[in-house]
Image (cartoon, grey):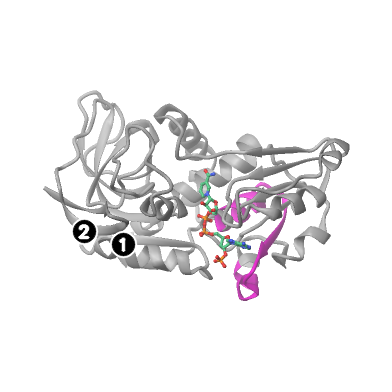
């Protein structure tokens, strides 16, 4: 038996559960660190059931740890290797299974704590900015909700790609840290609408911010809707949408199939991992909590005002 954070009647209970058994192409990973995400909180509150094939009552979408067992058909990695990955759930536990093609090696210069907060933010940001948003060098990009896990990843990635990065946050005290990650300008959340035009807007806040984004967009601009913390509905001016020949698109990662997640991971392994390895990217950590005190980590995320990721860490072993 291992221990895990299990959802029981809307609360997290640290309790023993049966060992997860790796499938043919899965790795069994001893979790060293695992990020906390808004989706975990929504799952705990009962509004976001686990995707098919994932543990129904153990949240956790990303992890870093050490491989302790390989499924019979696994061809990648070896027992003892440090890996990190995006999973459909089950990461807020001592042991979790990971599809071998969704696993990435943790660079030697990266702690497990940082690696545990890497996959969700960086895969989401790369997928939205580059794979779907088509960001290219020289373009002006606005990243809203820039102080969070996805935002701090997106600012760094966009700057590394040679885009002109504008970050918006409702925390002016984060301005110098965002500039340090590569933002050329840092605006307060309410200012951004008047500071266009932007070629691409990574909309991590949602609600009426999406309508504002459309009005701040350049001709042929794109709005990537990735977060809805400020609401899931808004009114869009369709004449503006047409006149700008604009594109508003959305995406989620959690519900994707194993193969789709592996595809998104492959792009990050190829284009982003080398930048983590050579120190050009980092994972800002807002706070860490012991794995068995996950509820405190969830509370910290909900409280807001943080810069970067909230990560749960295992009390023993190297981090
Ligand atoms: N579609 C996907 O695949 C996907 C993947 C990952 C995340 N997401 C979503 O994307 C969003 C960002 O994720 P994250 O991991 O970066 O979350 P996070 O670390 O909690 O950061 C969210 C950021 O947005 C800010 N924010 C929230 N509501 C706001 C509002 N009404 N006005 C201005 N700023 C606001 C927060 O500020 P405060 O700190 O002041 O609250 C925080 O800085 C979340 O909604 C998450 O659920 C989607």
Q: Name the quadrant of the C terminus.
A: bottom left
Dot 2: element: strand
Name the residue: 64% across, 43% down.
Answer: 129
Q: Is residue 263 above or below residue 103?
A: above
Q: Taking the image as four quarters, which one is ligand 1 found in?
A: bottom right
Q: Nearer the viewer, residue 21 or 82?
A: 21
Q: Which residues are magenta?
A: 152-177
Report x, y in % for residue 32: 28, 55
Residue at the farthest bottom position = 173
Dot 1: element: helix
The residue at which mark 2 appears reads as 14
Q: Which label was assigned to residue 238?
A: none
Q: Nearer the viewer, residue 30 or 214?
A: 214
Position of 15 with respect to 154 (left or right) is left
Q: Count neighbours of disc 1 (C-alpha within 10 A) and say few if under 14, some if 14 to 19, many if 20 or more.
A: many
Report x, y in % for residue 166: 72, 58
Q: Which label was assigned to residue 294?
A: 1
Tag 2–tag 1 contact (CB < 8 Å): yes
Is residue 119 covered in magenta? Answer: no
Which quadrant of the figure has residue 238? top right
Beta carbon at label 1 within 8 Å of ligand 1: no
Report x, y in % for residue 154: 60, 52
Is residue 172 covered in magenta? Answer: yes
Position of 206 with respect to 237 (left or right) is left
The tally of labels here is 2
């Amino acid at each position: 038996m291992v221990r895990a954070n299990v959802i029981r009647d809307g609360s997290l209970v640290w309790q023993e559960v049966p060992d997860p058994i790796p499938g043919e192409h899965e790795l069994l990973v001893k979790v060293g660190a695992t990020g906390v995400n808004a989706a975990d909180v929504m799952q705990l509150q009962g509004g976001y059931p686990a995707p098919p094939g994932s543990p129904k009552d153990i949240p956790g979408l990303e992890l870093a740890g050490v491989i302790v067992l390989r499924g019979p058909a696994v061809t990648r990695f070896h027992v003892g290797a440090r890996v990190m990955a995006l999973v459909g759930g089950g990461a807020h536990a001592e042991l979790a299974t990971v599809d071998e093609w969704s696993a990435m090696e943790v660079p030697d210069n990266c702690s497990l704590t940082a690696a545990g907060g890497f996959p969700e933010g960086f895969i989401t940001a790369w997928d939205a900015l580059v794979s779907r948003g088509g960001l290219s060098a020289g373009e002006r990009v606005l990243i809203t909700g820039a102080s969070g896990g996805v935002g701090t990843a997106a600012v760094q990635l966009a700057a590394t790609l040679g885009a002109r990065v504008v970050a918006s946050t409702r925390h002016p005290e984060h301005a110098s840290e965002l500039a340090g990650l590569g933002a050329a300008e840092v605006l307060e959340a309410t200012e951004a609408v008047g500071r266009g035009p932007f070629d691409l807007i990574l909309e991590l806040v949602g609600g009426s911010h999406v309508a504002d984004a459309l009005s701040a967009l350049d001709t042929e601009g794109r709005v990537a809707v990735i977060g809805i913390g400020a609401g899931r509905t808004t009114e869009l001016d369709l004449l503006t949408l047409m006149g700008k020949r604009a594109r508003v698109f959305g995406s989620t990662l959690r519900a994707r199939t194993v193969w789709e997640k592996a595809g998104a991971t492959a792009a990050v392994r190829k284009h982003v991992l080398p930048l983590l390895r050579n120190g050009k990217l980092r994972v800002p950590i807002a706070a860490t909590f012991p794995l068995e005190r996950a509820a405190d980590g969830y509370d910290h995320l909900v409280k807001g005002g943080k810069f970067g990721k909230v990560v749960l860490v295992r009390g023993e072993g190297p981090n």
